[in-house]
Amino acid sequence: AQSVTQLGSHVSVSEGALVLLRCNYSSSVPPYLFWYVQYPNQGLQLLLKYTSAATLVKGINGFEAEFKKSETSFHLTKPSAHMSDAAEYFCAVSDQGEKLTFGTGTRLTIIP
Amino acid sequence: DTGVSQDPRHKITKRGQNVTFRCDPISEHNRLYWYRQTLGQGPEFLTYFQNEAQLEKSRLLSDRFSAERPKGSFSTLEIQRTEQGDSAMYLCASSPRNSGNTGELFFGEGSRLTVL
């Protein structure tokens, strides 16, 4: 069975500071990995995905994530936080099938 | 073009009543998914359809839950004899035929159920 663990249910960073949201995965087969973002009162949106091509994946809004097989990690980063980045972020894994397994989410707060 | 739409957005019901949620996917998408999200948790998979065929159901989907997609377009999720533990956000998502197995889903805004 696949799973993801998101370390830190709440993360606060100052505007302009580095954003780092952590995700570790467990999968018995090469995984597909995703980051989704949920803004208040909106549906989840795909930020970026890893599907066994380049290990460094660039997404929307300046976010990127690096797949590290040796560490079973897929951490999400953004060099400089913006107020509009405040949202809940979910890491998810797929075993190349149809079903996504989500983590419990990390709520990102941006401090002005 | 509209995204995935869900109706109703909010539903308050008394324990023991039946409720039904509707999902209209993006028109050219042939796959449709239902997830459930409770407070402080990530979305949990319930079931999915390819066209009108229901291909997988989670063990979370008890016999009080039924989902249909009769013509391969919109879908309904019915909960019979609701219990307080059914209170959650019910999310619908769809994906296009050419997404393969990359898991890129397009989500609706969800239907929030409160069971009193």
Image: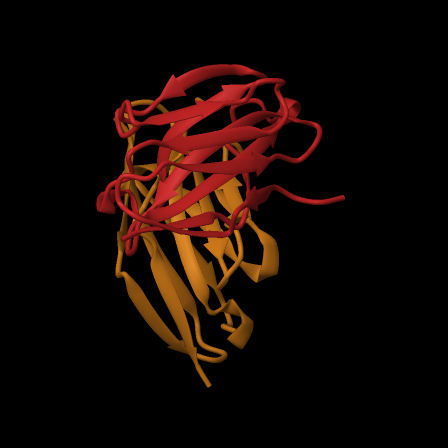
Chain colours: A orange, B red
In this view, B100 is above or below A57: above
Q: How many marks?
A: 0
Q: Position of residue A58 (x, y in %)?
A: 56, 50
Q: Is residue A34 visible?
A: yes
Q: Is residue A98 above or below residue A25?
A: above
Quarter of the image with the N terminus of chain A is top left
Horizontal arrangement in the rendering, residue A32 relative to residue B41 (left or right): right
- Horizontal and vertical percent position of residue A54: 53, 38
Q: Quadrant for residue A93, please give it.
A: top left
Direction from residue B3 to residue A41 in the image, left or right: left
Residue at the extreme right: B1
Residue A31 in view here: no
| Percent x, y of residue A111 | 42, 82
Q: A58 above or below B52?
A: below
Q: From what the image shows, is residue B66 above or below residue A26?
A: above
Residue visible at 35% across and 74% down in the picture: A12
Nearest the viewer among B116 and B72 is: B116
| Residue B4, x across and y down, in percent | 61, 41
* Residue closest to the eye, A78 or B50: B50
Tell me what residue is drawn at x 55 percent, y 44 percent: B7
The residue positioned 57% from the left and 33% from the top of the image is B94
**Corner quadrant of residue B24:** top right
